[in-house]
Amino acid sequence: MSQPYLSAHSQRIIDVTDPSDWNTTRLPLLGSVDSALRCQICKDYYHTPVMTGCCHTFCSECIRRSLVREQKCPVCRATAQENQLRKNGAAQELVAAFVAARPLLMEVAKESVEERRFSTRGEEGGTEDGGEDDGYPGFREEGGRKRRRGRRRIEGGGAPDGPMESAGGGRITRGSSGRVGSQPSSQPSSQNQVICLDDDDGDEDYKPPPSSGMVACPICSQYMKEKRVDSHIESGCPKESPASPRKRLRGGESSFFGSSKSQSGYTPAFPPASKRVDTKPGAPYPNPANPLDLHPLPKIAFNMMKESALRSKLQELGIPSYGSKRTLQDRYNEWLTLWNANVDSVTPKSKKELLKQLSSWDAINRVPVVEKTKVAGWTDQGWSESNKSHYDELIAKARTPRVKPEPVKEGGEEEEEAEAEETDDITSISSAQMDGACAAPTTLPNSNIIQTTVLNDKVPLNNVTQSFQPDFHQPYLDQAFTTALHSTPSPPPPFQAPPTYLPYSHVNVSEMFVANPLPPTTVLAGAESDTDRLAIVEEDSSLIGLYGKRKYEEMEIGCKKGGGSTSGGL
Amino acid sequence: MFHAKRLQKELSKIHQGLPPAGIHLVAANDFQEWQMDIQVLDENPLYHGKTFRLNFKFSNNYPIEAPEVMFIRATDRDIPMHPHIYSNGVICLDLLSSGNGWSPVQSVESVCMSIQSMLTGNTKNERPDGDDQFVLRTNRSLRNIRFVYDDPTV
């Protein structure tokens, strides 16, 4: 049934089609038909089309992916939610029909252009037609065959797709599985017509019966009593036990489905009422065409969930559960998208296929940390040894200013001792940092700076004339660093780094990397990747002025997260 | 994958269909980075007879996530004067930021058109406030810049 559609589908991956294809043919107006059948997000033909609350249609996967990002309709910017999505069966049929007919239409449209150009044949139209039928599994014939097949399917009960609900009568086609490939021109049997009506009643207009007093959780959109919602959300959106709600819903809905049930004598494998409660109502409606009995997944309020809980949740679902919490969230969302779109689909894929898709997503979106660090055949110690001279040089450089300066007032010797101690500290710190994996390069120069500035600045705090303001608009630390290195006899303007910002370096990091051959790998150990970490650091140094404290705090959190992920992995 | 497919479609559309006047594809060697040339078509004295080059960077989440778009310099291509375009080419336009004005239904072509019309409507021969400061420290990813969009007239 779905064969023509599928084959066309795979075909169009190879050669990309576009509405503009029609421009050059004799039927340029078909271009607008073509584009009307395409999802505006992926610009491809609707694949399992669903409609938003504002009646715009997209592929199920596309819109779900978009809604994860932003709960707005991409076209009109009206608020949209996943649980408002409804399947658009009409669009699906149109697409299937058009895609099946497209190559032939295109051929005809192009041929007639050529025909006109050469304008040789007059009455050969008839033979033309015959030729077409030969070349292409014909228009009419094929259509007829399909029609017949479609009919047979309805009568015989969905054999090709396997364990489909094939019990009595017309209910089989309820999920429109029988109609996917069938030509829209085919006259629906009277039976079929009845079914269509039934379908629409159930699908498009379905709302939770208002009398039942059930409301959807705003987060996971399970239905429950209004009273329960608060406690439900507070407890992190557990799966609601459908016990009491189910009963009530059934009662409320019996009028909905009771009649049709008794009419057709069909006992659905998934009683609609209970299905609706059991599953997340993101499920637009029960999908009897769905042979795998797939249930849509609920959204998760990640803020309410600990990393370990999330991890075990992913394990439970059978999807990879490595990575930081952020990664886990993203992966869950991707899986949610894939899975729920698959649930919508008339011809759902197996979980294995979905997992494959997920892993390719994983591959694209993450650079595995392990490979990065292993590749170089790198050891911390080896590096610190091979670059010892360079480090020594740097350390020596950092020390020099302290030996020279100070037209000091008093206690010069003591100071020098103190200096010696402190510089010792520095070296010990820096060597420790060379060993320590995380964040070495930023803290190494930083500790130097702090030391130097504090030392240069022996003035007691209350004497500071030009007190330091954390004005990040000035590249002050670069300056501080350079003045510290090439110290001039006149003491630099005294300032003191505010304690809050001590853990961070605001040094121009790119400069640091030039001067100091610290290995990128050391930086990386906690971070997702080379560039990531660099980006973070760069941001750190330069962004604060622009975004102020808030951004800064965000980054702090980000850093903590980064650190957490390494230890969390243990 | 997702983004490659979508960009492939846009590319074929640009190749086959006629892109709107004043918009030309310069380079699209991969699905990471494209360059487009745009021209302002009316008689705006600021931009008359000039062509500007836009650089598009696409992430893997492309239609869902906004591309990074900025003007770049090249031979004969300068950064247009505009109160919302910094002299390093960064464009302050809500359309270009995920979570603000970006929507997955936008495309390279539509972005070009938006920027084109943004230029067309401009009469001020000036840079944004704090351009010097901004340019000094913008050696980072565009994605990390947060703008405050306050000018409804653009």
Image (cartoon, coloured by chain):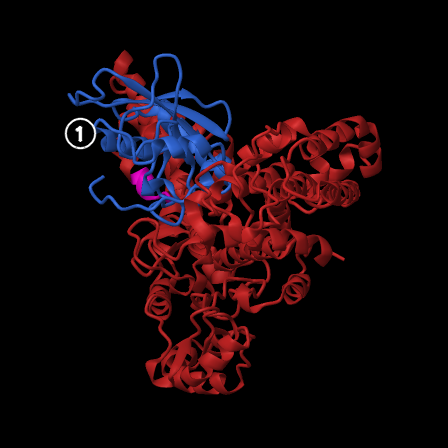
Chain colours: A red, B blue
Q: Is residue A269 above or below residue A183?
A: below
> Residue at coordinates 32% horizontally, 61% vertically from top-left?
A53
> Residue at coordinates 59% horizontally, 40% vertically from top-left?
A532
Q: Residue B3: image x %, image y %?
A: 49, 38
Q: Is residue A287 magenta?
A: no
Q: Quadrant of residue B153?
A: top left
Residue A320 visible at all: no
Q: Residue B147: image x %, image y %?
A: 36, 44
> Residue at coordinates 54% horizontally, 58% vertically from top-left?
A336
Quarter of the figure with the C terminus of chain A:
bottom right
Q: Is residue A39 magenta?
A: yes
Residue A293 visible at all: yes
For label 1, the SS is loop
Q: In this view, which residue lies farthest toward the front?
A: A410
Between residue B98 and residue A494, name the one nearer to us. Answer: A494
> Residue at coordinates 29% horizontally, 24% vertically from top-left?
B80
Residue type for callout 1: Thr
Q: Residue A468: image x %, image y %?
A: 49, 46
Neighbour tally class for label 1: few under 14, some 14-19, many 20 plus, Cα within 10 Å: some
Residue position marked by numbered label 1 in the rendering: B123
Chain of the residue under label 1: B
Report whether A237 appears left or right of A179.
right
User: Range of the magenta residues?
Assistant: A33-40
Q: Is residue B3 above or below residue A203?
A: above
Q: Is residue B48 above or below residue A320?
A: above
